[in-house]
Image (cartoon, helix red, strand yellow):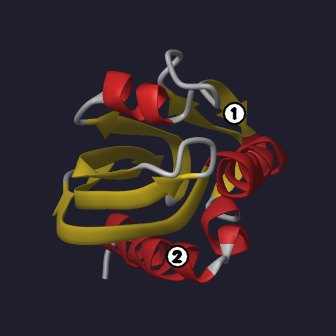
């Protein structure tokens, strides 16, 4: 198994654990210089750096903004330096009680077996921001 395939397996495992409330497994994928880049239009948007920054952002997302978060990852696309997870995101807004359910892709940049960045590509950031009002 190549380094990128090993990382893809770890990423898949993190997606499986996240809906169970395990943000730790997801955050542990990020080293000190890695970043998770969320859309600036969202209340939790911006660049979250390193394990501590990513963990804090994830805790904020699950304690303040969403409940019942689940990922239905349908495809993992593996390239030389990237893993793209594609599927559906379902969650309930803690502020409005409204539910989202839409396609989501998350692109992971990997080099030398380490995550450099992860960028979610939302189907509709304005709808997400609207239910979080």
Label 2 vs label 1: CA separation? 20 Å
Q: Quadrant of the N terminus?
A: bottom left
Other residues around mark 1 within 10 Å, as few (<14) / some (14–19) / many (≥20): many
Task: Name the residue located 31 percent from the left edge and 35 percent from the top edge.
Answer: 121
Task: Name the residue located 26 percent from the left edge and 48 percent from the top edge.
Answer: 104
Q: Secondary structure at mark 1?
A: strand
Other residues around mark 2 within 10 Å, as few (<14) / some (14–19) / many (≥20): some
Task: Name the residue located 52 percent from the left edge and 76 percent from the top edge.
Answer: 19
Q: Nearer the viewer, residue 43 or 108?
A: 43
Q: Secondary structure at mark 2?
A: helix
Tag 2 and tag 1, C-beta contact below 8 Å = no
Which residue is label 2 attached to? 19
* 24 is higher (above) or lower (below) than 42: below
Give how far across and how far down residue 108 sits, in percent. 40, 47
Query: Quick check: can you spot residue 112?
Result: no
Give how far across and how far down residue 113 sits, in percent. 50, 60
Give how far across and how far down residue 13 sits, in percent. 46, 81
* 24 is higher (above) or lower (below) than 64: below
Task: Name the residue located 39 percent from the left edge and 75 percent from the top edge.
Answer: 12
Q: Nearer the viewer, residue 76 or 132?
A: 132
Q: How many marks?
A: 2
* Direction top: furthest residue: 41
The nearer-to-camera label among 2 and 1 is 2
Which residue is label 1 attached to? 48
Q: Answer left or right for 73 relative to 61.
A: left
Q: Quadrant of the C terminus?
A: top right
Q: Nearer the viewer, residue 81 or 19?
A: 19
Q: Answer left or right for 69 relative to 126.
A: right
Q: Earlier in the sequence, mark 2 or mark 1?
A: 2
Q: Quadrant of residue 127?
A: top left
Q: Quadrant of residue 101?
A: bottom left
């Amino acid at each position: 198994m190549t380094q990128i395939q090993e990382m893809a397996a770890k990423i898949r495992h993190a997606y499986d654990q996240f809906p169970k409330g395990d943000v730790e497994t997801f955050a542990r994928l990020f080293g000190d210089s890695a970043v998770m880049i969320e859309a600036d239009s969202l209340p939790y948007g911006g660049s979250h750096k390193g394990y501590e920054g990513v963990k804090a952002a994830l805790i904020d997302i699950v304690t303040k903004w969403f409940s019942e978060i689940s990922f239905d990852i349908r495809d993992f696309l593996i390239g030389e330096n990237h893993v793209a997870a594609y599927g559906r995101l379902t969650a309930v807004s803690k502020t409005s009680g409204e539910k989202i359910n839409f396609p989501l892709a998350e692109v992971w940049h990997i080099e030398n077996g380490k995550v450099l960045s992860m960028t979610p590509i939302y189907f509709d950031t304005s709808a997400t921001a609207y239910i979080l009002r």
